[in-house]
Image (tube, grey):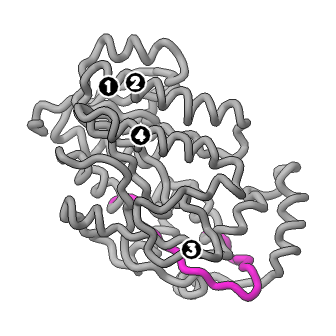
Amino acid sequence: MNPQRKKVLVTGARRPVARRLIRMLHRHAKVVAVDRRCPKHLPVDVRCEAVDLRRRALDHLFRRHRFDAIIHAGTLTSLRAGESLHHAYNVVAVNRLLKLAVQKSVKKVIILSSAELYGHRPANTVFLSEDAPLLAGERFAAWRDLVQMDLAGCVTAWREPATEVVVARPVNVVGSGIDSMAMRYLRRPQVPVVMGFDPQVQLIHIEDFCSAIQHLMAPGIRGAVNIAGPPPIRISQALNFLGRQRIPVPRTALTLALKSAWPVRASGFRDEELDLIQYSCIVSDRHLRDTTGFEPSYTLKDTLRGVDEPF
């Protein structure tokens, strides 16, 4: 595909990663941005349409446009959303999006997933590859729909040879505008840690992540792809660099505190998320680097500084 002639659909246009991708892509492609409500301050040459992926409006969108590529950044990740809403957005809507992409002969589809779906477990090996099982849903019910979405993309990637489906599995993304568990955790002035544990964590700056997605737009790439930035670092080392105060607390005490605080909205964390700060989940991005030549431009220190970038 000639990049100058691509028409690219970007879903979830109001999200920080999508907005950054739109600003990168519009210089070389015709970008159509969609979300339930159109965001403000998009480039003037970007067409934005208010489309709910759960509705028939998605079918009408594909009748009006012939897309060369789709980047699905509209994944629902809010833990406050109900299970039915998660299923509607992350399973039903994504399956319809994939079906329409195949029917309309879209050449490239990139679905933004997460490396966290491998699961933070005590038996994890170091540098998990793309063929490792996705085990996060076993203990973290809120991510089961995300696992289904990820697997649906992988199945379509190999079942439909005419449409190259890439399931991008990034490590924790940091940077301006990102509101994730990792960002909320690392931004705290006083950070509770699980007593007796100091797992490694992988981070990637939003600019590097969007650059990696651009690399995945190249033809010939399909299936699951891990995306990582600089080398992993211990949580204690990251907190020391950021000038945070570590507060070691037993796991049982943290669990009881979060179980009480979550229902009354006194905490932005669920007790299941404690696995993320107790056990490591380190992935290998060798496939991405060998296939595309991608190299992160942000060093480990620059990436860590992204935690404190203004929201």
- Within 10 Å of the Cα at label 1, are there few (<14), some (14-19), or many (20+) other Cα atoms? many
User: Mark 4 — residue?
Assistant: 155
Amino acid type at mark 1: Val
Name the spot of residue 252 as percent of width and height, x first. Answer: 86, 74
Quadrant in which residue 242 is drawn: bottom right
Q: Going from the N terminus, do you reach mark 4 or mark 3 first? A: 3
Asked if residue 298 lies left or right of residue 39, the reply is: left
- Mark 3 crowd level (few <14, some 14–19, many ≥20, 10 Å Cα): some
Give residue 102's mark: 1
Tag 1 and tag 4, C-beta contact below 8 Å: no
Instruction: Give how far apart the Cα atoms at labels 4 and 2 are.
Output: 12 Å
221 relative to 56, above or below: below
Q: Answer with mark 2 or mark 3, whichever residue precedes in sequence.
A: 2
- Does the residue at mark 4 contact the one at mark 2 (Cβ under 8 Å)? no
User: Looking at the image, is 186 positioned above or below residue 36?
Assistant: below
Q: Which residue is mark 3?
A: 124
The span picked out in magenta is: 187-207
Distance from Cα at disc 2 to Cα at disc 3: 34 Å
